[in-house]
Amino acid sequence: MSIIYQRERKLLTIETENTSYQMQIDGNGFLHHLYYGRRIDAAEMSYLHVNADRGFSGNPYVLRNNRTFSLDTFPQEYTSFGVGDYRINSIAVTNGDGSYAADFRYLSHEIMPGKYTIPGMPTVYDDRGEAETLVITMQDPVTKLTVKLYYGVFPSTDVITRCAEIVNNGQEEVTLLKADSICLDMPFGKWDLVHFHGRHCLERQVERSPLIHSIQTIASKRGMTSHHHNPFVILCDHRADEDHGDCFGLMFMYSGNHKTEIEVDQLENVRVCMGIHDAQFRWKLSTGESFHTPEVILSFSSQGFTKLSHNYHDLIRHNVCRGKYKLAQRPVLINNWEATYFDFNEEKILHLARQAAELGIELFVLDDGWFGSRNDDNAGLGDWFVNTEKLPHGLTGLADEVNRLGMKFGLWIEPEMVNENSQLYREHPDWAFAAPHRSPMTGRNQLVLDMSRKDVVDYLYESISKLLRESHIEYIKWDMNRPISDVYSHGAPRERQGEISHRYVLGVYELMNRLTSAFPEVLFEGCAGGGGRFDPAILSYSPQIWLSDDTDPIERIKIQYGSSFGYPVSTMGAHVSASPNHQTGRTTPLKTRGVVAMSGTFGYELDLNKLSAQDKEEIRTQIADFKRYYWLIQDGEYYRLTDLEEGSFYTAWQFVARDGSETLVNMVVNSPQPNSLLIHIRLKGLDPEAVYVLDNDGSRYSGAALMYGGFTFPLMSGDYPAEQIHFVREQA
C-alpha cells in the first residue's frame, strides 16, 4: 500500500519508493499539509509545525479564543477563500447570495486501487498496475460547495498527480472565478525557482533565481501553453545541482491558459498554486454540476535535477504517451518545408522523395500548401481538400508513388485555424472567434476556429477523417500558428463566455482523441509554430512534438537542454536542416547538425538537390548511426554533462542504457576559441566495476575511470565542431 491512513491520529501518508507526502485532519476539519520530501516511513511530522500568535493574522471563529491558529499562517492542502487566508488562493468563488467566501472542511476520504481519470481531459495513466488513488472530500458547511482532492500515486517513478473536482451541492448557483489544480505549501527552506521561458524560435530557456518576498508568476494568457512560459517549474534548494540537493517539480498537464504563482509570505513560508489562468475565466455551476481541473504531475528528488528529470522522462514515456508509437521505433523522416515552402508541384515533390528514398529516409512529409487555394499563408485554411492544380493525382496518387519508393507518406494540417479567404469562412463566418462589432486580431492572416462548438469539431473530424480514409497517410503533423485572442463564441450565451477558453481546449482534446482512436496506425506529431504547445497533455495524443521552428543546431542545443529537464528526447521533434540556417544564417557542419538532431526523433528538412555527393554519403551514415543507437537514445537514461548557465564554450550530454551496457556521449563546441582549452568531461551512470570499449579505436576504460577521472577529447578547430563517441561494456 502506498497510501496509509492512521485513524487514531487522523494522519494520511502517501509513500513512493523514495518520497513521503503527509497531511493531517484536525478536530475542526482543517486539512493540514505536514510534509513532502524524502521518505520518512512511519514518522509523524506534525511536530514540525508550531503555532504562534501572529499580528494581523486573524483566527477562525470556531477558534476565536486560540490566537495561535490562523488560516493565514498554517500550511494547507487546498485553500479556503475570503475567510482569513490572505496568501494566494487555489480557488475563488461568488455564491448565490453575492458573497465571496468558501470555507472548506474535511468530510471524508477514500483510498482506491488504480488511477483516477478526468472527464474530457488527458491524464497520467497506470500501465504497470502499481497506481493508487486517494480522494479527499471537503465541503463548505454553509453553501455545501464541495471540493474533491484527487491524488494519484506512482511509487516507482516518485510521482504524485493532483487535481480537484468542484461540486455544487448547494441550492443556489455558484460562479467559479479561479479553480487551481494544486496548492503546495513548503513551510521551511530557502528555495530557488527554475522555470523555462522564451519566445518563438527560442523556447524553454532555463532561468534560475532565488525566491524573493513577493508573488512570482509564470503564466500564459495566449490560449496555448506558449513559446514564452512552459507550464513546468522546479523549486530547488540553493545548493542543488545535477546530482545533489532537494528539487520539487510541478508540471501542468494542460494545453491552454495556465498560471503558476509562488509566494514567499511574512514567515518565509512558500506556497505554490498551479492551474488554469483565472484571466477571463468564469464558470457557472448550477446545483449538482461539477467542474474538473486539469492534472498536475508532482515529483521530488533529493538527488538533484538529473533524478528529477529521470522521474518525468520515465513517467511520460510509459504513462503519458499512448498508442502504437508510444515505445515503437519511429521512422526517420524528411519534411519538404525548407526545401520548397509553398512553391511546389507533384513532380518537384516526387523528385525530392526519390532522392530521400535513395538515402534511406523512411517517411516523406508534405507540409503546408497542398490544400484549397493555399499558395501562401493568406488563404485556404479550413478547406481540407486537395489542390489538384499542384497535385493532379491528388493525395492518393502522391501517397501511392511515395509508398512505391519504399517510404511512408505524411501530411501537415492546421485544423484549429481558418483564413477569411476560404470556402469554410465564407460559409461559416460565425465559426471564428471575434467579439461582436469588433474586427479581430489576425496572425498570419488567419483566425481561430471556435473549438468549443460541437459543429466545428464534427466538421474537422469528418474533413480530416476523409483524408485519412481515402489516402494511405501514416503520419500527421498537427500545427497551430498563432495565439488566441478575441475569444467570443457565437454559439454560447453571454453568461457562458467566461467558459469558452477552457471549452476550446476541451474541444481540441475531443478532436485529437477521436482522430487518434479512429486511426491508431497514424503517427501524430504536435506543433504550434514549433514549440508553442509543448506540454504533457498534447503528448497524450502525439508522442512527439516539433520542438521549435528554429533548426539552427547551436540554438537547438539550448532548446533541447531546457526541454530535457522535464521531457524525454523521444518526445522532441528534431531535424537536420540547411546551412546557412534559414532562421539565423549560421553555417555549421553537417556532422554537428546530425549530432544535435539525433538527440530527438530525428529527420531532415532541407533541399536534397543542393547537397554534394559527399553530403549525401554522410546522411546515409547518420541514418545508419541513428538506427544503430536508436534504443539507446530513445529509451536510455539522459544526462546533462555541462551546465549552459555556466557559460562553457562546449555542451555535452550522454545517453546510458538502462542496464549500463553501453553509452553514447555527444559534444558540440558552441563557441570556438583560439588556443582552446582541453575539453574534459566526467561521464555518468556507468558500472564502475565494468570495462568499456571505445568503438572507434578499441581503447579500454573502466567505468570508474570514465566517471571519476573523466574523458579528454582531442583538440578541435573550425566552425562548431562536434563529436559523438560510443562505449560498449566488455563482456566478462
Image (tube, rainbow, N blue to C red):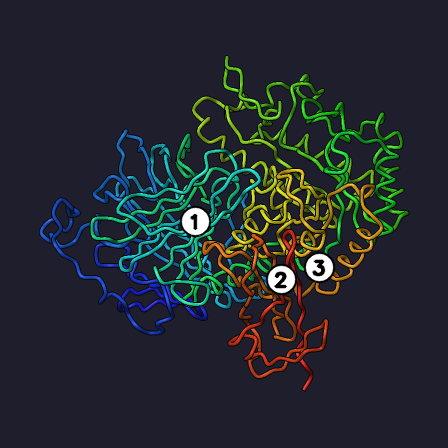
Q: Nearer the viewer, residue 564 or 458?
A: 564
Q: Is residue 290 visible?
A: no
Location of residue 466 with respect to 420 vertically, above or below: below
Of the residues shown, which amino acid type is indicated by label 1? Answer: Glu
Give the CA distance from mark 2 to mark 1.
Answer: 23 Å
Q: Could you tell me residue 410's position as x and y percent?
A: 77, 43
Question: Which residue is pictured at 62% across the width and 32% down the height?
Answer: 416
The residue at the far left in this view is 65
Give the CA distance from mark 1 to mark 3.
Answer: 34 Å
The quadrant holding residue 349 is top right
Camera-near label (1 vs 3) is 1
**Quarter of the figure with the C terminus:** bottom right
Query: Which residue is tagged 2?
Result: 666
Q: Which circle marks residue 207 in the picture?
A: 1
Q: Could you tell me residue 363's position as x and y percent?
A: 79, 48
Q: Nearer the viewer, residue 222 or 49?
A: 222
Question: Which residue is pictured at 49% across the width and 39% down the height?
Answer: 228
Of the residues shown, which amino acid type is indicated by label 2? Answer: Asn
Q: Which circle marks residue 328 in the picture?
A: 3
Q: Could you tell me residue 328's position as x and y percent?
A: 71, 59
State if disc 3 and disc 1 touch (CB < 8 Å).
Answer: no
**Quarter of the figure with the N terminus:** bottom left
Give the CA distance from mark 3 to mark 2.
Answer: 24 Å
Query: For mark 3, does the 10 Å Cα neighbourhood hold few (<14), some (14 to 19), or many (20 or more) residues?
Result: few
State if disc 2 and disc 3 touch (CB < 8 Å).
Answer: no
